[in-house]
Image (cartoon, coloured by chain):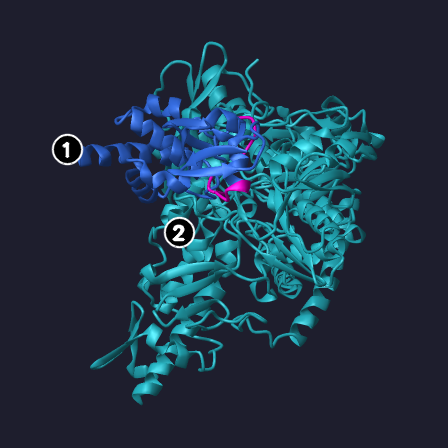
Chain colours: A blue, B cyan
Amino acid sequence: MARLSVNGTGQDVPLEEDTPLLWALRDALGLTGTKFGCGIAACGACTVLVDGQTTRSCVTPLSAVAGKAIHTIEGAAARKPFAAVRGAWIAEQVAQCGYCQPGMVMAAIALLESNPAPTDADIDAAITNVCRCGTYPRIRTAIHLAAAALAKQAR
Amino acid sequence: MKSRLRRRLLIAAGLVGGAFVVGGYLFYRGRDRLRLPEGVGAPQGEAWLTGWLRIGADGAVTVMVPRQEMGQGISTALPMLVAEELDCDPASLAFEQAPVDSLYANATMIADGVPFRPDDHGWLARLARHSQYKLGELLGVQATGGSTGVRDGWEVMRRAGAAARAMLVAAAAERWGIASAECSTERGRVHAPGRSLGYGELVAQAARQPIPANPVLKDPARYRVIGTSLARLDVPAKTEGKAQFGCDVRLPGMRFAAIAQCPVFGGSLKHADASKARALPGVQAVIELEATSTSAAAVAVVADGWWRAKRALDAIGIEWHDGPHRELDTAALREAFTQLLDRGDARTYETLGDAPRELAAAKQLIEARYEVPYLAHATMEPINCTALVKDGRCDVWVGSQAPTLVQWLAAGPAGVGEVRVHTPFLGGGFGRRAEMDVVVQAAAIARRVPGTPVQLLWSREEDMQHDVYRPMALARLRCALDAEARIRAWHHRTVSQSCTGELTARLQPAAASDLMKDKTMAEGAFDLAYAMPHRLVEHVLAHQPVPVGFWRSVGHSYNAFFVECFLDEVAHAARRDPVEFRRAMLAGAPRHRRVLETAAKAAGWGEPLPPRTGRGIALAESFHSIVAQAAEVQVAADGGLRVTRVVCAIDCGRAVNPGIVTRQMESGIVYGLTAALHGEITLKGGRVEQSNFHDYEMVRLADCPKIETHIVQSGWEHLGGVGEPGTPPIAPAVANAVFAATGQRLRRLPLRLA
């Protein structure tokens, strides 16, 4: 049994403590927005925020996140950059098959929280997730768009 | 001569078959493509107007999308066709994946399978296409592939929109006691002088009107929806993580299954000691699965969560019989393919003039060998299927490119007479999700735990090592130049397994035959637009235990690499500029020429580049669209390749949604770039060596070039696909750029400098 804080709510999860967070979210809590892609932290489809840091939940055991604040795509609206990211993603028509997009959106939120005006090189370094549909150029543009929208709000 | 006779015989056999089909069609002519789907009601407050859309009392329009959304944007493009003729407000549009019904069959995909050049409009080609189309309607297979979505939907979905509009107008005219001709429509309302009613207010009455068989369609000059970059209907849900993919299906009491398949192709299960696994928490069942024509021998564990199922699976001591292919490796495959390439019996796909004679007499003969490896699809969503066997029925939830096949193939292993297919989004398809392996497995597992829905999800390792791969292919190309350094004779000879033949054998072993001429083997080679007086295109069929299947753009994915790289070699040998050299052969193909010129001009062809940087170009027609790409490649001192810029031009006739077309070009380019730079599935000991993204690398955001797409609009009569045509030209464009930068001609994918 593990006690987790997911999207601001305390949750008891009746699973072994070495279970990866991904499976607690998807199978025990029914939060299917976080995706399984590779199981070895190589693709980023399972990206969630743990205390604001991007975390690949497919290799993160429940024991490592007990007592920490976990945010998934379902609770992303609670993060400040989400509305701007969502707006930019729609304006740029980023998603194609859409499977990797929750992970991409979470990674973009974390990037903008720590770096409100990322350069192309910053984006290259921060967005290491895999997308097979090739939405990369649109993601780059959308992050710049979201950053600009956030800067405008801040003024 | 012998091969020509055989070709005639094959065509004759096809025509006899076709005659039966045409006869069947005449008998069957009453079929109505606007009818309602069978056994499907309308939700409260909505009514069907034809089988292609429902309108609600609030005026909301829900369009049935007969092709599966896997990223290509079809769930927006097809509703746009309906909306245009319906005259509804695009903001009122929603879509549903159509239920499984022969009404929604993809006849165009079947018709496209005939081995005739797309520009062949002779009587034989037309008869063959028409017969195949009718066969497609009769088969009634709902399938997504071959970049056919818009082309197949173009007539029927516009007609459905126009028919629904006519029914709404008739209802309004009836209510007002005036003639339909006095009414007009605009943005979801019917107007007559002094009055107007919304579609939602009219729909109940409209649904009682007869469906007009031949509604009048708009003049394309009046289009207001078609041709705009309407925002995709699926993007908001996908951005918010609310879109439901196959593996997101959650049902009351659902269990999860993990699976281990025999790692050696063609092997079988020897022994599985499940005693430890059964004692682990949450485990409900351990199930052994025999190999079938569609799926490998396997052991599956059903548990209350996927991770528990996977852990229990790993605790099973599984021993396999490796079977007859335990020695198979890539070197042996290459050797076998090379022998076939040099000496095997070939099937001829195109004969122009007498290429062998001209090549034998040539003063200057250019010859080269090319090779591409097997490739995995690596869809982001690993392969999965959910099934429930209950009360003599099997319900299947699966993101599938062929829901009709799911209906046909799940019944047997599930041991039931009735199958219902539910179709969530596909987390990538690329041809992989036309396969039925996981469906057969899930149905067999569900049969063993009746009453319990089970979601079978493959690990990434299973996905990578049990794909149906893009075929490995070898090519030998030969060319003779005339005195003016123009191509006089061209010989294209390839060897590979057959995608269509092997898929047929998996689905219906009794129907498989080497006599079937698989067009996909030679597509992109036998259908070139370049004028050459003598040309011979042949393919040698190989049989190997490595399963092969459709992979985004299929035969074009490697034939474009062979043709466009070799053409570059020939241009170089002829001391001609690669663009000029191609242009000179396209006098009779103005659309191709314009696409080539558009890409070259936008790329700044001929303008100087920094040191160790090269620019390459390639042109390929596929799925009725013509695409040219110019790539710029920087070569690092250590030989690393960096593609910095790609300029793409496409003529897909006209773009229904230019925004989607542009993104599909980007998508096809990135997909093809991964294959050009990284993709390689190799075998050792009868098994695939790669297992996950750490050893099967992908292009990532940091490596992604700047991509610029230009849409060349020709005409609605030239409508072509867009999901696949972006892929074929990128590998040769990049390889040609590497040559321009380094003088090294790379003839094998993935591209690696010596």
> Toward the viewer: B467 or B125?
B467
Q: Which mark is residue B738?
A: none
Identity of the residue furthest to the left in this view: A155
Q: For the point 46% across and 28% down, which residue is it? A: A66
- Rendered position, B394 above or below A138: below
Which residue is pictured at 32% across the width and 59% down the height?
B91
Instruction: Read off the residue under disc 2.
Output: B655
Residue bearing the label numbered 1: A155
**Mark 2 or mark 1, whichever is nearer to me:** 1
Q: Position of residue B549 (x, y in %)?
A: 66, 41
Side (left or right) of A143 relative to B53: left
The N terminus of chain B is located in which quarter? top right
Which residue is more in the foreground, A60 or B668? A60
Residue A137 position in % (x across, y down): 38, 33
Q: B387 and B192: which one is in front?
A: B387
Tell me: residue B285, above or below residue A140.
below
Residue at image location 37% in from the left, 68% down from the top: B86
The relative height of residue A45 versus residue A30 in the rendered view (above or below) is above
The furthest residue to the bottom: B177
Amino acid type indicated by mark 1? Arg
Label 1: element kind: loop
* Chain hosting mark 1: A
Quadrant of residue A76 within the rendered picture: top left
Residue B665 quadrant: top left
Q: Which residues are magenta?
A: A27-42
**3D distance between C-alphas at marks 2 and 1:** 40 Å
